[in-house]
Amino acid sequence: MLAPQRHRLILEQLDKDITVSIRALTQRFGVSRETIRKDIEHLARTAKLEQVRGGATRIRTQEVPMADRSQINAEGKARIGRTLAARIPQGASIFLDNGSSTQVLARALTEHSGLSVYTNDLEVARILAPVCANLVLIGGRINTEEMATFGSEALEQASRYHVDISVISAGGLSARALLTDFSEEGVNLREQISRCGQTCYVIADQEKFGVVGQYALAIPLESTCLILDEEPREDLRAALQSQKLAFLVAGPQ
Amino acid sequence: MLAPQRHRLILEQLDKDITVSIRALTQRFGVSRETIRKDIEHLARTAKLEQVRGGATRIRTQEVPMADRSQINAEGKARIGRTLAARIPQGASIFLDNGSSTQVLARALTEHSGLSVYTNDLEVARILAPVCANLVLIGGRINTEEMATFGSEALEQASRYHVDISVISAGGLSARALLTDFSEEGVNLREQISRCGQTCYVIADQEKFGVVGQYALAIPLESTCLILDEEPREDLRAALQSQKLAFLVAGPQ
DNA sequence: AAATAATTTGCCAAGTTTTGCCAAGTAATG
DNA sequence: CATTACTTGGCAAAACTTGGCAAATTATTT
């Protein structure tokens, strides 16, 4: 057996098994310990795998240890993500804002294909990169807490695009003030994003219910649909109806 | 059996088996080692397969989906990164392009503070986010292989900024063609970035030496300094001098 | 929990086998 | 007869094996 074939088989096995041991590979290929070690050394030098004692592992994809808000009410966010993903057709063009809920939606969209995605969230871009036909990142000043772009540059660039569906998340949803958010730059960009879409979905899970942010989120109500993970209480439901703001509660499936 | 038939059969077997060995083929066809070697040599010259020691493999259609090219010649890249980082003052405004070498530089800059950073590389942004006073991501279409933005949007946005120092990486550095790169969108953006800086550094580690990309990289030579990790060979050194292109070899410290 | 023994592994050097490459020779072909 | 295709043999380089030793890891005992 030739060296390149061994290399290939080693990498294939790594794809399945996460780690491979020198011991096992010597048996499998019927070559000496040292040969396998050299193989692994070579593959490590060319950044195909990571050499560890006794064998090798897949290359570590540096995970971001940042505070992950998507853990909060993860089940509800996931339900919203699945429901909305089911309403986004293959190959659609979509504009996603930033936020933990949006990131969960993005993960739910990784089964889609041929999407054209516009977003200001770096993590959303990273998640959807493998399945996008087109992927556009809105430029601008980065808010390092959110790892997303904002500011006049972002507003201006966003205003140039038109998509089938835009999706934004809300910081608060209340009977008193309806949709609200906590930063001016966030509101500005979300309003712009909402105007880019033929239809607009606003996602808000129950942790946003009753929360009133400092900034009102003014979006085109008639082409908007709210996606929630719980039935709204009576006062909220009345407020939504009086504003003719459609909503949909994400079911368990 | 005639040579063309052998060629055909060799290629057919490669379609099935990924690799073929000279040894096996001599037995199969009943010809000498040297004959098979010539067959493979010929097929390799006409780009039908790739010659490897002891036989041949299929041609690599696409470059490995390398998770992290920064591991190739990591030591040299790190040396370049440290040397250049030492020349960037605290609080400077810098424009960084995308690429594995630039990412290594970014890691070397995480000891700095108060930087204003402009970049089209999502990973560079992620690395430098914690230490930036300002962080601006250039928007545009994302190249999902590089996870960086390109295109007309990116060019236009980049053209609005002016910084103290711009840093770009080169795909190739040769006596014949000097600085080159492999994609048109890449050179366009890099040239723009180089014009944004008061001074411009171009980083190229030894794996780029002698490599000639399809696109020439035209940058303002008089305000540019090349950072290398090895002394250039005589012909390259002469070419750099005749172009009055300054360079600096990154030392061990 | 610490100390010790046994095992595994990494790394190096020397030895063996395989392969690449070259040159010269032989067979086949038109 | 000249050209092309193939074989043969030899040498150097590369790949591979083997064995040894030190370091790291694991198991065992105290």
Image: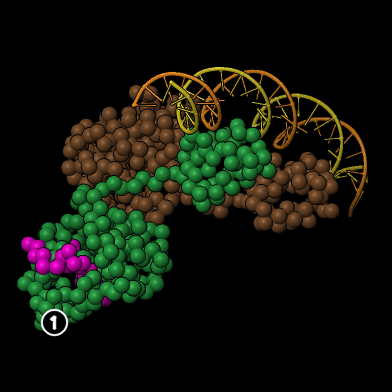
Chain colours: A green, B brown, C orange, D yellow
Q: Residue at x 42, y 31 (%)?
A: B75
Q: Residue at x 27, y 35 (%)?
A: B109
In this view, A41 is above or below B195: above
Q: Chain of mark 1?
A: A
Q: Tell me the residue that label 1 is attached to.
A: A241
> Where residue A78 sits in the image (x, y, percent)?
30, 65
Looking at the rendered structure, the secondary structure element under dot 1 is helix
> Where residue B28 sits in the image (x, y, percent)?
80, 50
Q: Quadrant of residue A26?
A: top right
> Where residue A73 sits in the image (x, y, percent)?
23, 61
Q: Residue at x 46, y 38 (%)?
A: B72
* Mark 1 neighbour class, 10 Å CA radius: few under 14, some 14 to 19, many 20 or more: few
In this view, A189 is above or below B200: below
Is residue A189 found inside the magenta-colored segment of the image? yes
Asked if one can make out residue B234 in the rendered structure from this viewpoint, the answer is yes
Relative to the observer, which residue lies in front, A147 or B207? A147
Is residue A152 left or right of B76 when viewed as pictured? Answer: left
Where are the magenta residues, as a range?
A187-214
Relative to the observer, which residue lies in front, B67 or A137? B67
> Where residue B111 sits in the image (x, y, percent)?
24, 33
Q: Quadrant of residue B96?
A: top left
Is residue A96 left or right of B226 when viewed as pictured? Answer: left
